[in-house]
Amino acid sequence: MSIHLTVLCENSVDKVSPYGLLGEHGFSCHLKTPDGDFLFDTGGGMTILNNAKLMGIDFSKLQGIIFSHGHFDHTGGLKQILEKTGKIPIYAHPDLFSTHYSKNSGKIHNIGIPWTQAELEKLGANFKLSAAPYEVTPGLLLSGEVPRISKVETGDPNLLSMSKSGEQLTDPLCDDLSLFIKTSKGLVILLGCAHAGLLNIIDHAINVTGEKKIHMILGGTHLKFCSDEQMTATLNRLEELDVDRIGASHCTGLRGARMLAERFGERFSSASVGVEIVF
């Protein structure tokens, strides 16, 4: 039995065949498993239908949709997907619809999920929200809320939430989840943005799955926004664990990707639109 993973939405495009694949700021990954097809995030909504059609992916066959967190660039394609699926389970954290803002050049931008829960439920979304680890199907474990233990992972100060009184607060992003995939070669950790911190996510993955071997880490690592101290600690931990493969996407950034590539050589790759991996 195998799991076939296809990157559908990402900032860049890996290949020109089939011609017409498009990149956008965001992330989405399709998983074909022995227990059915699942979608991890939906990108920002600009490219997912185009790319899925070209990659031969039929959303009407989806058994469920999994969300890493409630930012628009990971949830923006949901309405389009629901038009293809009808009623479908959606797995996420209870804070999926919490307020999410970013501060850029002194301006505040709303970057949360673009619709209310009620609007999406009318279209067929059946939300299964859990802060605890949740087995979506055998071999696919949604992380649940990740404990924030690492002292070097302090989060992105430009990401904000709003109190009921309108006060700006640092966004704790409690809804940040990852997907842990069990394979014969070890654990695969699929990331949305790793807002919880890659070090925290790795330790949590080992604790909740009991798997000590990490075969691959794939997705957005948020290293674009980290300190030098966090970058060094992350690189050292990945080397210590002897991770077989690292597929960097989205919010990893050029600096993060360069440093990962320099340290891990052929074990590093870009997980761009069109990348297909079979475990």
Image (cartoon, rainbow, N blue to C red):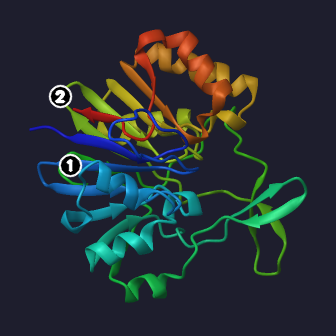
Which residue occupies 54% across, 68% down? 95
Which residue occupies 67% across, 65% down? 100
Q: Is residue 96 left or right of residue 278?
A: right
Residue 135 seen by the camera: no
Q: Is residue 276 left or right of residue 200?
A: left
Determine the residue located farthest toward the right in the rendered image. Answer: 106
Residue 134 in the image, given as x and y percentages of width and height: 32, 58
Residue 208, image quadrant: top left
Q: Is residue 105 above or below residue 169?
A: above
Residue type of the residue flagged with mark 2? Ser
Crowd around label 2: few <14 · some 14–19 · many ≥20 (10 Å) = few
Residue 63, image quadrant: bottom left
**Residue that carries the numbered disc 1 in the rendered image:** 32
Determine the residue located farthest toward the front in the rendered image. Answer: 19
Q: Nearer the viewer, mark 2 or mark 1?
A: 1
Residue 126 in the image, given as x and y percentages of width and height: 33, 78
Residue type of the residue flagged with mark 1? Lys
**Residue that carries the numbered disc 2 in the rendered image:** 184
Looking at the rendered structure, the secondary structure element under dot 1 is strand
